[in-house]
Amino acid sequence: AAGHEFEKHAFDVAACVGATFIWDGFRSTIRAMREAVRPAGKLVIGEQYWQTDRVPSKYAKEEKAMLTELELLQIIRDEGYDLEYVARATHDEWDRYVTQDWHGLLRWIEENTNHPEREEVIRHFHMMQDKYVKYDREHMGWAMYVLKPIAY
């Protein structure tokens, strides 16, 4: 998507849901998507965020690109937008999303008993679960943000 050529200023809304890494982060995603929308066009961005600024440093270093919502809000304003609307995932919704990955990995592990990378997949599966239970669920959130250009 980062290299995709789109018609400039042709759309009313541009959306990037859970993939700001494509444009190397939240700020650069806003800048890239701004080029796709008309002057009054809105942006919709789905993004993970720190629920607190008191995240264990070892864990925070593993998730360098993640920001607090206050930091996201500052970037939004710096880039000439107001935050018009937020829809946050609840813990239950986030649990369902994450555990769908677990379910898929477990099915793969059970169905691929002779695969040469099976042990690596099992380790990855256990690491994902450990990280989620130990850190992610407590410290990480996910939300959809609707950005409207500042018009005042």
Image: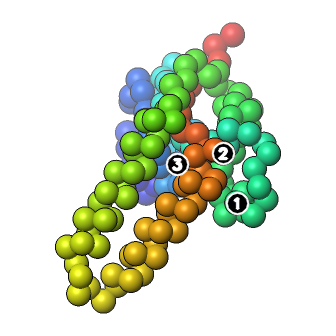
Q: What residue sits 42% from the left and 27% below the top?
A: 13
- Observer-nearest of 137 and 24: 137
Q: Earlier in the sequence, mark 1 or mark 3?
A: 3
Q: Residue furthest top?
A: 152
- Residues packed near mark 1 inside 10 Å, few (<14), some (14 to 19) or many (20 plus): some
Q: Which residue is mark 1?
A: 59
**1 or 3: mark nearer the eye:** 1
Residue 107 in the image: state x and y as whole percent.
25, 65
Q: Choose top left, top right, bottom left or bottom right for residue 141.
A: top right
Query: Which residue lies under the disc numbered 2?
Result: 139
> Marks 1 and 2: CB-CB under 8 Å?
yes
The amino acid pointed to by label 1 is: Tyr
Q: Residues within 10 Å of mark 2 (few under 14, many from 20)?
A: some
Q: Which residue is mark 3?
A: 20
Please, is residue 53 above or below residue 58 in the view? above
Residue furthest to the left in view is: 111
